[in-house]
Amino acid sequence: MDNQDPSLSLSVRRKKLNKGPLFKKIGLGIALIFIILFFSRGIIVGAIAGVQFLTIQEITATTTLEGILIKEETVVTAPVTGQLKFISEDGTRLSVGARAAQIAAADQESSIVSVFTPVAGIICRHLDGLENILAPENLELLDLSYQDKLAVKQAVINKQVEKGQPLFKIIDNLALLNIYTEIPKTDLPPELADKHGWLTAAWEGRTMSIKLREVRDKGNRWSGFFVLANYPESLLHHRQVRLTVTTDKLKGLLVPAGAIVYQEGVPGIYLVVKKKAQWVAVTLEGKLNGIVAVSGQGLGEETRYVSNPLFTKEGSRVE
């Protein structure tokens, strides 16, 4: 005899009956989702297509160089002991034989001794004691691998000076300016070491030209001497500077590299023509930092294109 509890059997049958409608609801829900996706696929493609206008742009790649300036400097010393008074302001351009300062001699009552410039250039009172060491004629002998140990300190010029004491220097502002820098090999942009032409550099918002002069291998570091031209005169008053160098640039009709779609090995992009995607072949003019310059028939400023053609196909609706 079956001793199964009738109430338990009834409960099991009810659960089985309830599962049937549940599975049907899930199936209908999935089907409904697919139907919605099918009919809205055009809307989805258009939404993620990222339609943009082609415009002529320019982008650059830069690197930072920190280094020590090596200049044509002539130090002028005090001819006598006494009270110093500057005649020319710091940064003034002076010709040869110009009176830059005067000293009231201590050992001669009411005697004023003038200090004249031995060379032409810019007067600079920023003395650091490295003027005769960091000279252009010493470039072949200089080993600045431990440039951080250089004591770049500004000398304090008091009113009372001693005979033979450095007073100021005259910097040749017409000569090419040299800068020494060191960079870990892992941080060295290949574009900087491979290029020996003039590049553009910036310092405190001012631009100049920079060119690699010499490269030296220092084990795990790379060191180089650069030449600066067309530099601002205010740069001459510094010994240690930081420059931003433009190592590469790209100009033209720029698009993201992801916008390029290859068909049978030919690069192209999707243009938006009457709200539909139309693939056109392009010529790749250059690439920099994930951006590509393109050219081709029918391309120009204000031409609309698909920047993110992930699901885009020929004829896809895009706006």
Image (tube, grey):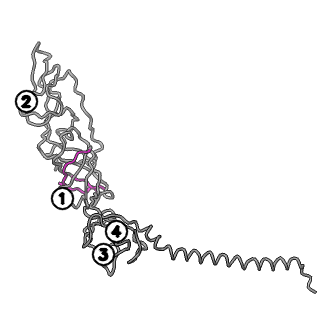
Can you tell which quarter of the image residue 305 is in? bottom left
Q: Nearer the viewer, residue 281 or 221?
A: 281
Quarter of the image for the C terminus: give it.
bottom left
Q: Amino acid at mark 3?
A: Val
Judged from the image, the secondary structure of the residue bearing numbered disc 4 is strand
Instruction: Look at mark 2 in the image and give the residue it sits on.
Output: 98
- By secondary structure, the bulk of the magenta-drawn segment is best described as strand
Instruction: Look at mark 3 in the image and give the residue it sits on.
Output: 280
Judged from the image, the secondary structure of the residue bearing numbered disc 3 is strand
Vertical position of residue 161 compared to residue 144: above or below: above
Precedes in sequence: disc 3 or disc 1: 1
State left or right for residue 210 relative to residue 317.
Answer: left
Q: Residue at x 25, y 52 (%)?
A: 245
Q: Residue at x 16, y 47 (%)?
A: 230
Residue 302: percent from left, percent from top: 29, 64
Precedes in sequence: disc 2 or disc 4: 2
Vertical position of residue 107 compared to residue 201: above or below: above
Q: Residue at x 17, y 31 (%)?
A: 168
Q: Amino acid at mark 1?
A: His
C-beta proximity under 8 Å, tags 3 and 2: no
In this view, the mark in front (3 or 1):
3
Other-residue count near label 3 (Cα within 10 Å), few / some / many at <14 / 14–19 / ≥20: some
Instruction: Look at mark 1 in the image and give the residue it sits on.
Output: 196
Precedes in sequence: disc 3 or disc 2: 2
